[in-house]
Amino acid sequence: MRFLKVVYVLGVSALTGAAAVAGCGGDDAGSSSSNPAGGTGTGGGPSGDCSLRHPVCTAVASDCIAVHDNQGSTKIGLRMAQLTITKPDVLATGYIANLVAQGLTMNLPLCYLNGTGTFSWLLEFDTATGKLRTGGALPTDDPLAGYCFANMTAGEFEIAPTEIDAPLAEGAWSGEAETLNVPIFLETSDEPIILPLHQVKLTDGKVSADNNCVGRRNSEALDPQNACLPGQDGDPPAFINGGKLSAYITLEEVDRVIVPEVNQSLCVVLSGDIGEYGNGGMPNTCKRDEDGKIVLRGDWCSATNSAATDDCADAYTLGGEYAASAVKITGLCPQ
């Protein structure tokens, strides 16, 4: 399947390290925007202007290319439009970040959004109860038709949204979830790569007054000479982020997430060094010591939920910032 071919490139690029990063325009700042560069924008602004003109882009008045109007509703549906990953390094820079970006960015070239749109992270606020439902969504062929929360099993992982307390105070909000399994579809497929997240914190978020945006489109910085798309290294980004997220992933769990086409675990992919940290098996999982512990050391300790020590380094932190735009959310996907 085409999905597996993309995953193959993702895995190989992680394992080839700095050479792939240099060849694909890595971000010198140590992070990468989720909006892919390159391609041809067709958003409809006049020459020398990256403003949006096409009715698809302007049907909902917003600062973030909303495709659904939440104004006046007690249910506010949003989809992450951009994710700038800062940790871990292998996801934050270079080719992997660009591939994830391609999946997260909508396939809406009329609005200068030239992604595949197959990786979706949804946020659904209920202002009446002060709750937030969040999780991954299945890919959709038509972003205007809406998104449903993924409700499925992938290997040992249960994929479903989680509901947390996140009351809005003049748009400002934050919330925490103990666990959240986020499915990443890089092309349409029933078999996602899973990010099993723990101690998820969504902080410093601000929903706009019209309930349609977190953050905004970076209109003034985009260049018509670059087809009004973000720069090759994500600078300038397509959106100004308006929220932050953090979590951790354990090495044991991601060692059980197998990237099919390269037949390697996500633990090996995250290591960035197949020779040093792969055990050479089929599938190739992370190398272990004589006590059965994974040799690769992360930057976090899951037992204490704090920075790694000499005695505990069994996890990696995930950090990032995001922007989000209004979409129609149709509930749980049918199983």
Image (cartoon, grey):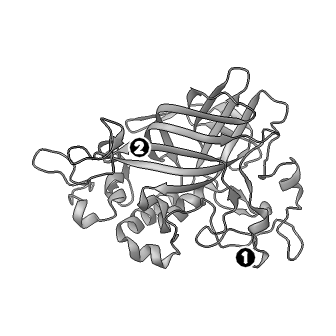
Please identify the residue farthest to the top as the structure is shown. 129
Of the image marks 2 and 1, the number of the one nearer the N terminus: 1
In the displayed structure, 233 sits above or below 249; it is below
Q: Nearer the viewer, residue 170 or 3?
A: 170
Residue 310 placement (x, y as % from top left): 21, 48
For residue 226, which numbered disc appears in the image?
1
Q: Which residue is mark 2?
A: 248
Q: Residue at x 50, y 31 (%)?
A: 177
Residue 224 placement (x, y as % from top left): 79, 75
User: Nearer the observer, disc 2 or disc 1?
Assistant: 2
Residue 294 placement (x, y as % from top left): 22, 49
For mark 1, give the secondary structure: helix
Q: Residue at x 54, y 65 (%)?
A: 98
Q: Is residue 170 left or right of residue 149?
A: right
Q: Amino acid at mark 2?
A: Tyr
For mark 2, give the secondary structure: strand
Q: Nearer the viewer, residue 54 or 27?
A: 27
